[in-house]
Structures are given as structure tokens and as C-alpha cells.
Amino acid sequence: MSHLSADHPKSTRRAATRKARETRDAARSQDTPVARKAAVPALLLFASGTAALIYQVLWVKQLTLVVGIEVQAVTIAISAFFAGLALGGWLFGKLADRSARPLLLYAALEIAALVLGIGATQALAHSAAWFAAWQASAGPLAWALPLALVCLPAIAMGGTVPVLTRALAPSRDDVGGTGGRLYAANTAGAITGALLPAFVLIPWLGVQGSALAAAALNAVAALVAVALTRRGLAASVGAAAPRTQAFAGPARMAVALYAVAGGIALGYEVVWSQAIAQFIGTRSFAFSIVLATYLFGLALGSAIAARFADRARDPWSAFGMLIGAAGLTALGGVACAGGWLALAQRHASALALAATGNLLTSMCASFAVAACAIVLVPTLLLGAAFPFALRMAANGGAHTDKDSNIGADVGRVLALNTAGGIAGTMFAGFVLVPSLGLMRSLGVLAVAAGLIGLSAALSGSIVRRAGVVACASIAALSVIVAFVTPADRLGTRLGDAHGGSLAYYEESAGGTVAVLEQGDGAQRFRRLYIQGVSNSGDAMTSRRYMRLQALAPLIVHGGEPRSALVIGLGTGITGGALLAWPTLDTRVVAELLPAVVRASSRFDGNFGMSADPRMEIRIADGRRELLSRDAHYDVITLEPPPPSAAGVVNLYSTDFYRLAATRLNQRGIVAQWLPLATQNEDQTRSLIQSFLQVFPHAALWTTEFHEMMLVGSMQPMPLDVPRIRARFAQADVARALREVGIASPEAFVATWVADRSALAYYAEDARPVTDDDPRIEYAPWVRRGDFPSTLAHLLALQSEPPLTGADAAFADTLAAERRTLHAFYRAGLDAYRGDRAAWTRDIGTVMSADRSNPYYRWVMGGAE
């Protein structure tokens, strides 16, 4: 007989150890059957997650057309989507516990998502004008329209995970594993849904067709769920009895901690979306890969942790260490990103190109390396925390029935985590980043994650010293890394990467704006970078095309222009050129980012327009500027980013041109910047076709070697030579154009290339870019050598301009100016081909004819 009593401490510890071992052995024996049982529901949630992300990607794109592309507007609208997910998880999690046949409830949710998803996509496509009109009359109440359209279908989507978790009827001992597997499957589907729109659906099917593809997935998931119920492959579940005791304190603490962790995780995403841009650019492909990497980390982390969560002795400390470590690695990944990452991207890109011969695959490999280096590890840790959070919430509650209310518990965890994510997104985007910048914001989030982890370790029913020490150490290390990382780390890296000195740098809610001073000697200039990507500068080449972008439509206008709108401020050179026109009463510039307005004073050649009282600068999305106001203009000229950049195609579509045409006065003109080197020739033809779909009178002008300009009107635009001469005689206009190498009316008209009939011939079989078919944003990567052929083909369209009132002297001088300009362009094409002899001949012709031209001299390396 033992001398120890049954309640002796040592005996108690041995009994507890024995019981824990038995529990773990039982869990291992049940793990495989539970995993098999979850296989089909996991496939259903994979399809559901794919559909949900397809809808989300489409709605984000559509919402920019409705509420504008301003970051605040889009964030608020997308938050409504996540609010719907949270509400759906909360409501349907409770309902699932009272349902005897939760699989049928799941099928009903999929059908609801199908109907409401298609309806929302259709309604958003026609809501922009309604929203603008309603906002003008009802103010903030107008937001009910877009918020309701994205929130209602999201409610149905949000209920799928807790309902299917309940359908499996797991015990509380394996809810962490089961819920983790289903969450991983749903997130894996979301990865697919994040990639499909950019790489497959939108380029092939357009926006509405992509929504139908998502609806098909909803339908398949619903039909499979009904079939499973009818074949009896999923057992019916008895409806849960009403809860007799409130959700207990430990469970409330677990859910609260995970909710705050969700806010921190979405805060990381806000910072990452800006910090990573300088490594990946602004193509939609790049952002899709980053989002997919984010979701992949969550799914993989959850799937791995699901195997261990139900056997963990201390889930609270495990959860705390994972959350804290995620914050530390999120901060460290951005802080350590530098030249080594760019080198790794180049190697990955080269290997992919050698293996596939495909430029898009090569660039995507580069994007994936950056995404994995910065995003993958933190999201793995965040995903791994989910099964432990479920375990903490499920086992921390007080329930009369040990296995009751599982759906409600899972729904509550997901709902509050999503609600925390909404708050985190708002706080990081609207408060942290504008006030602290990217690196300091990331430091605050990392330290907060460390404190959340430490709180979790201290909140378990049994506080273990090792767990507390580990979490405290992670928190302390986060504080140290946040303190020693320079606040301008990303700005310094940008200057080093592009070989320039930083003249201006600002990290704002809408994006990172920088001005770098680059070049040497007479070719020293400043360049504007937005989100780490070059947009424009004040070099002679840039000044030339931007001055023409403003002054050319004013010069050829058939009346007396009094008002002009410039969409896109950039360096301010286009807007500043309006100051040279003496008869303008209204000069408006619409710019999306306030930081760009503040940076514009750093550039030469814009005539100090940002401080000139004659200029009105409005912080607005250009499309919303036209939608929300009934103002009409004599000239609307656009200088947005290239059409291949994410979100910019809204300003190059046929739908936009129709809107712009309604805001023109009689004889009004729209002038669209047409870059040639940023897309392949097929896409250039589509851009021209989009313009021709709206304007019965159109012409193509060449404004610089790499740039052209489309000019369109609803009325004829003859080139009246006496009027052009009179307008060119205005001192400020003549000076502004002479500075960029256009010294006479003949030199100006020499930049005219082709009329509408020639453009229609060139773009004959091209599909126009529309809001529903914005495929140029998802076009293949620019092929090497495509730009020279595009330029050559467009110059081959050259015809005689529609002159009126021209004398023989004007025609002769015009012909000479055109020969010189085309010789200069041929010299540029010679350089692309590497034909030095031809270049020497052509550039010699140019310099012999117009050696004093400041544009030609600058390109040749001389002073202006």
C-alpha cells in the first residue's frame, strides 16, 4: 500500500499527467477519422472561399467607379464587406447550433451568396451616377447604397465556415483541429480566388462574366451539400439546447485577444501594401500575388497548427508566442529588406525566364520572391494562431452540454476577429500611417502584438512560466527592433535603389510619395515616385510632352477657351502650363494624393502653380470629379499614370470618355496622354479604339519620342493657321513652348500625326477598353522591342494636317520642321536597333537643321 494518500500533491500531479497522456492518445486516434470526415466539407469551403474572393476583387474594382479611388472611400466601402462577413459568422453560427440539418443551411447560404453576389455586381455597374446624385442631395446617407450592395451577400458568405463546422458535429476536444482544417480550406480557396481574376477571369470574361464564374462555384457547392444530405453522408445533428450559462470569462478573453490580433494583422496588410510596392511595382498581377501569399501563409499556418492545437498542453502560451512572433517578423521583414532582396528578385526572374521564356512568368517570380520575403512568415504565424484561438474559446466557455454551441463559438471567433480587422484597417490607414509613417506604424503594431501575446500567456487557466518568459522576450525584442529601425528606412532604400538623392519624402494614407534628384551636369533633374514607382519628372523630355498636353488643345480649340480641367497633377508642369494662357478664367486640377500636391513645389518648369491663386487644386479622383459636379469645360486634359497600373484603367475606358464628353462645352476638347512604352502594341490599339468609340472627331499628336496624345471633340477640329499664329504670338504661350523646343507655329503643327480615319484603320479590329472589360490592366508584360515597332507604325500613319488659311510659306516651313522631327525619331529608333551608322546619319541631319533646339540638345547631352 502506498504511503501517499489519493489527494497528496505528488499523486495529484501523476494522475493529471496520466490523464493528459490518455487525452493526447485519444486525440491521436481520432485525428485521422475526423480529418477524413472533414474532407468533403473542406472542398465545399474551398469552392466557397474561391467565389468569395472573386466577388471581393470585382467589387473593389467596381467600388472605385462608384465611390472614387480615394483610399478613404474604398476602405470604408470594403469594410462593409468585412462587416457582412463578421455579422454572418455571428448570426449563422448561432443558427447552426439550432439547426437539425446544418448542411441544408449551408446550401441555402451558398444560394443566397449566388443570388446576392450576381445582383450586387450588376447593381454596382450602374450605381455610379445614382450614388453621385444621391450624395449631392442626401449627403452621407448615399453611402447606404454601396454599403448595402457589398454587405448583404457578405453576410451569407460569412456564415459558411461556422455552419459547416457545426455540420461535422465535432466535440470540443477536437474543435481546434476541425475548425483549423476548414478555415485552411476556405483560405486556400481564397488564394485561388485572389489569383483567378487577374490572371484568367477578367482578361477572358470581363467583370460580369467573372461574377457568373463565381456564382457557378456557389451553385456547385450548394448542390453538393444537398446531395450529401440526401445520401446520408453527413449525419443529422440534434438541435442544441438554449444556452443556460453566459459565455465564460476565459472564452471571452480568448475571443477578445484574437479580435485585437485580427486588427493588428490587417494593420500589417495596410503597411505592407505600401512598403512592398517599391519591390513589385503597381501592376495588378503583383498585388494579386502578394494577396495570395498573405492568404497562403494563413492557410498553411492554420493547416499545420490544426494537427497540434487539440493536443497542446498550454494553448494560451502557444497562441501568445505565435501572435508576438508574427509582429516581430512583420517588422523585421520590412526593416531588413534591401539590396539583397532586389538581387534575389533578379535571380528568380532570370531563372523563370530561362525556364519558360515567358516575360509575365519571369516578373511574377520576382513578385513572389518579394512577397515571400516580407509577407509569408508573419502570415504563417498568424494562420497558426487560429486553431489555438478556437481551442481557447471552445474550452474556456461554460456550457451545460459539452458539445453544444460549437457553431456559435466558431462564428464568434471569426466574427470578432473580422471586426477587429476592420478596426485595425481603419486605425492603421487613417491614423497610424499618416501620423507616424510606415516604419513607426509597423513598430507600433509589432509591439502591440507582443503585448497581446504576453497577455494571452498570463490569461490561461494554468500560467506556465516558460510561456510567459517566451512571450515577454518576444515583446521586448519587438520594442528593441522598433526603436533601432530608422523611420526613413524605406525612403533611404528608394534613393539607393534608383541612384538619386532624396529631395522629398512623405508616407501618407493614400501612398508613399518621393522626389529623387537624379542625373548629372546639364541633365540633372528631379523625378516623382509614387508607391516606389517612377511617374514623371522635370527633365526636358517630360516638360515637353506635359506642356503640349495642356497647350496643344487650347491652341487648336475652335472657340475662345475660358475653362480647363487637368486630371492628374504629377509634377505640376501640365497644370502650370495653363497659367501661360491669358484668357482662361477657370483653371482646375484634380489630384488624388495630397502628398503629390505638397511635392509639386520641388519641380522646375511648373511656373509655381501650387502656390498661384489662379489655380484651383482639388483633392479628388478625376472620374469622381466629373461625376459629382455639373461643371463644363472647354478643355479636359489627362495625365494619369500609365494604363497598365492598377486602378488607372478607369481613366482610359470608353465609359470614362462618354462621361468626359458630357462635361464639355460647345467645341470642347478632351486630350488624353498616350504613353507608348508602357504596354504592347495590341493594347495601344485598344486604347485608341476606346477613344474613337466616343469622339467622332479625333487626331493623334506626337508630344515626345515615347509619348503621344489623343485629341477628341464632338465637333470638327480644323487647324486654322491664322488662329494658331495669333495664339502662338501670345508672349507667355510662345515662351512656354520655345523652352521645350517648339519655336514656331510650324514646329507646333509638325507634331500632328494623323486624323480619325487613319486611327480607325490602325485600330480597326481592336477591342475597346471598357469598365466591364478592363483587360489592359491585366495585359501581358511588355515585350522587348515592341515600343520601336509601335512608334514606327504610328508615324507611318502620317498624313497632311487639316489646315485652313495656310499660305505656301507656312506649308514649306511645316514640311521642313516635320522632316527634322521625324529624323530625330528615326535616330532614336536607330539607337534601339543598335545601328550606329544610321544613328550618326540621322542625328547629323537633325543637328544641321536645328542645332539650337533645346529639346534636341538636351537629349544629346548638352545644356538647354
Image (spheres, rainbow, N blue to C red):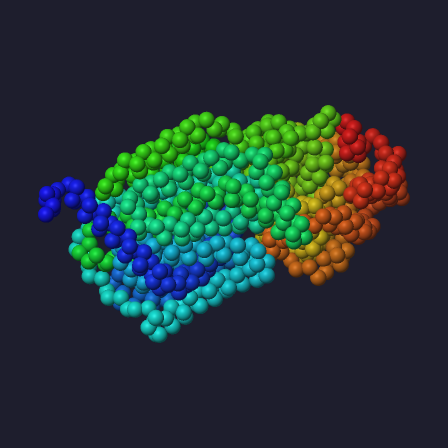
On the picture, is 793 further left or further right than 80? right
Relative to the observer, which residue lies in front, 448 or 689?
Answer: 448
Determine if residue 581 is in view.
no
In this rendering, the answer to whether 161 lies above or below 283 is below
**Quarter of the rendering containing residue 631:** top right
In this rendering, the answer to whether 88 lies above or below 468 is below
Relative to the observer, which residue lies in front, 84 or 694?
Answer: 84
Q: Residue at x 53, y 57 (%)?
A: 196
On the picture, is 688 further left or further right than 825? left
Relative to the observer, which residue lies in front, 362 or 486?
Answer: 362
Determine if residue 315 is in view.
yes
Measuring from the top left, give residue 685's x and y in whole percent.
Answer: 70, 55
Q: Residue at x 60, y 51 (%)?
A: 777
Relative to the observer, which residue lies in front, 662 or 13?
Answer: 13
In this rendering, the answer to whether 743 lies above or below 710 is above
Q: Residue at x 44, y 68 (%)?
A: 220
Residue at the limit of the structure toward the top, as seen here: 521
In this rendering, the answer to whether 763 lies above or below 228 is above
Measuring from the top left, give residue 130's x and y in whole percent.
Answer: 48, 55
* Quadrant location, the C terminus: top right
Badge count: 0
On the picture, is 507 further left or further right than 431? right
Q: Residue at x 18, y 48 (%)?
A: 15
Measuring from the top left, give residue 830's x and y in whole percent.
Answer: 82, 43
**Quarter of the rendering containing residue 568:** top right
Residue at the limit of the structure toward the front, as seen here: 1
Measuring from the top left, give residue 380's x and y in whole percent.
Answer: 43, 46
